[in-house]
Image (tube, coloured by chain):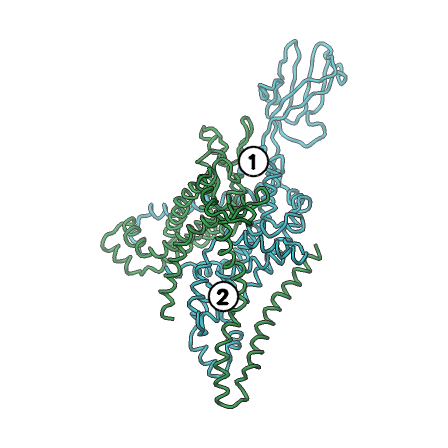
Amino acid sequence: MAASTGKSFVSRFGVHIAVLVFVVIWTIPTLGILVSSLRDKDQIIASGWWNSFASSSQTEAGRLPAASAQTQKDGKYVIEGNVFGDGAKRDISAFGVKAAAPTQYKAGTAADLGDGVTLQVNADGSFVLASPKAFEGDRGQRVYYASSAPPKFTTANYDAVLFSEGIGRSFMNSLTVTIPATIIPILIAAFAAYALAWMRFPGRALLIAVIIGLLVVPLQMSLIPLLKLYNGVGTFFGVPSKTYLGIWLAHTGFGLPFAIYLLRSYIAGLPREIMESARIDGASDFEIFVKIVLPLSFPVLASFAIFQFLWVWNDLLVAMVFLGTAPDQIVLTAKLNALLGSRGGNWEILTTSAFITIIVPLIVFFSLQRYFVRGLLAGSVKGG
Amino acid sequence: MAAQIFSAIFVIIIGVGGCVAYFWGANKLLDLVFPSRGVSGTAAVDNLRRQGLVRPWLFVGPAMIILTIYLIYPVIETLRLSFLDRGGANFVGLANYEWAFGDHDFRNSILNNILWLAVVPAACTFLGLIIAVLTDKIWWSTIAKSLIFLPLAISFVGASVIWKFIYEYRGEGQVQIGLLNAIIQYFGGQPQVWISLPFWNNFFLMVILIWIQTGFAMVILSSALRGIPEETLEAAVIDGANPFQIFWKIMVPQIWGTIAVVWTTITILVLKVFDIVLTMTNGQWNSQVLANLMFDWMFRGGGDFGRGATIAIIIMIAVIPIMVWNIRQANKETGGH
């Protein structure tokens, strides 16, 4: 576009800033779950993920040892130790003895608790509680402190989710559903598309119109009759009604209108001369299709395969209707939906599961983006 | 699990092999029944003609059978079921439709669907167009577009988890780990449970779909913009048009057809939106939409197929104008072919 001629430096700079703002807004949500899925699960709830590279601070409460731990030193009764015990090291910034004021005193200073009793908690967690009189009672002094832990990243969430939450199994189920449901429609659609593009037969125009009409039929229209049909077939033959075969065929059926439409418009655009010269050489339609049309159509076949793969992998509705929810059938999207209900607050599980669910589409998308965009353009700009 | 992988591979081989065998075998059979080689001239011509009559149906046959079972028959059956009772045994006339328009949930869903239809296609198209124009001339447009396009590959369920994390609310005195509430708090506002705020929660759900679909609009519109002749724009610049005039008066009218396609495609998607509502609120707090309500009735209390079918028919009715327009548009195009 020539619109940039005569634009000032400022307005060109403004364009970069504006695009950057859009990119940041569109990327941050995904980044959030990626970062969170790698964080320690206690830290996820202690600080926002955008702070995950800073130390996270949290207020904790503890109880000092009881009177039995006291020793006498310089005429005073003293209890010493470390509030963390032998546990992980954190930095204490402030402490207090009342729940209402948990960070009343700075770390390293001695707090006067009244009656000559002093308490000092240092940054490393060591403390000294001193009193002129002997301590009594078997409950130690309550103490509150604000500690900060260094950022901690881990793959433990992935271990947990893949192997004990059942996401690993669902991942396999998703692959089992997706791969056949992507491959089966391609061949069926390709033959139909060729016939609709290059063969003359009565009713062809009507068939094309029906397919274009079916493109926009909402899936919801099919669900109840097919559910009844599947249940009927299941009862009649005494087989389960929710099977992988059932969902493969369902996805094939739902994907076919788009597949035929996309492939037909591409195949119809192939040069007529190639077909005619092959026909003059005595090739049949079948030979022309297999030897000429299929190889030439590779880009559009790839486009459709990517679409169908993403659509089937990301589908929830069809999977919920035609597959069961037992571990041997539940797919990733349905599993994630179930986890949202049962593990609503466990963000380490949800973010990790979500990331596992989206990683395969993202890889497919980034490695084959060219074909994806091409299919998108061919599939929707027609008629525009 | 090993058995499952094995059976999947087995099915791929059987399925693909079966397709290949069918197409190859059916063609072979046709050649055998009506031989065109090795017979006398007139017989060969006759047989070729007969082959030409049969062969197209061998090619489109499997597709037609599957489309009939999975789409055409269900459309008719759903229409029939919408006049029957919950079990599908007794004819009830228009009772299901009367129920629907008197039902609070249904009316709420219709209103929400209208809200979705008014906001989402417009927002996606507008944002997509803006981004397409902005990225047209910058050197890092490929990476920028890829990142904005990326949510299109994410499932609605995955996107719902992503955004639920952004809308997360934690009780008073706790650290807000949801980005939205953290920002609100930073500027001194009061954190909210966003997805349960009636009416406004619809918009928080719509944001998810807009986030996903803007990339789609951007890619399509960006390629349409590139189709505008360079000379047209240059002429406008020479005539002293400013960037806003160029955008509104030159670019937008030139790609009007593409804008309509993007708009209708997203409109159809909005009518079918189901996963986002199911996973975010399941229709609570007045956020129900038709597609989710239909799913609900399909299984509620063992399933009420009559009411479910009725809701499906109403979604279908909303799609029909677009369907008719598409078919007419396609007929115009293929008229000469």
Q: Which residue is mark 1?
A: A54
Q: Colour of chain B?
A: green
Q: Colour of chain A?
A: cyan
Circles 1 and 2: CB atoms closer than 8 Å: no
Q: CA distance from mark 1 to mark 2?
A: 47 Å
Front in this rendered view, residue A95 or A258: A258
SS at badge 2: helix
Seen from this angle, which residue lies furthest bottom? Answer: B40
- The residue under label 2 is which amino acid type? Pro
Q: Which mark is residue A299?
A: 2
Residue A315's spot in the image, x, y percent?
A: 55, 51
Q: Pick whichever of labels 1 and 2 is earlier in the sequence.
A: 1
SS at badge 1: loop
- The residue under label 1 is which amino acid type? Ala
Q: Which mark is residue A156?
A: none
Q: Residues within 10 Å of mark 2 (few under 14, many from 20)?
A: some
**Residue under the image location 56 percent in, 47 percent down:** B87
Q: Are marks 1 and 2 on the same chain?
A: yes
Residue A189's spot in the image, x, y percent?
A: 52, 66
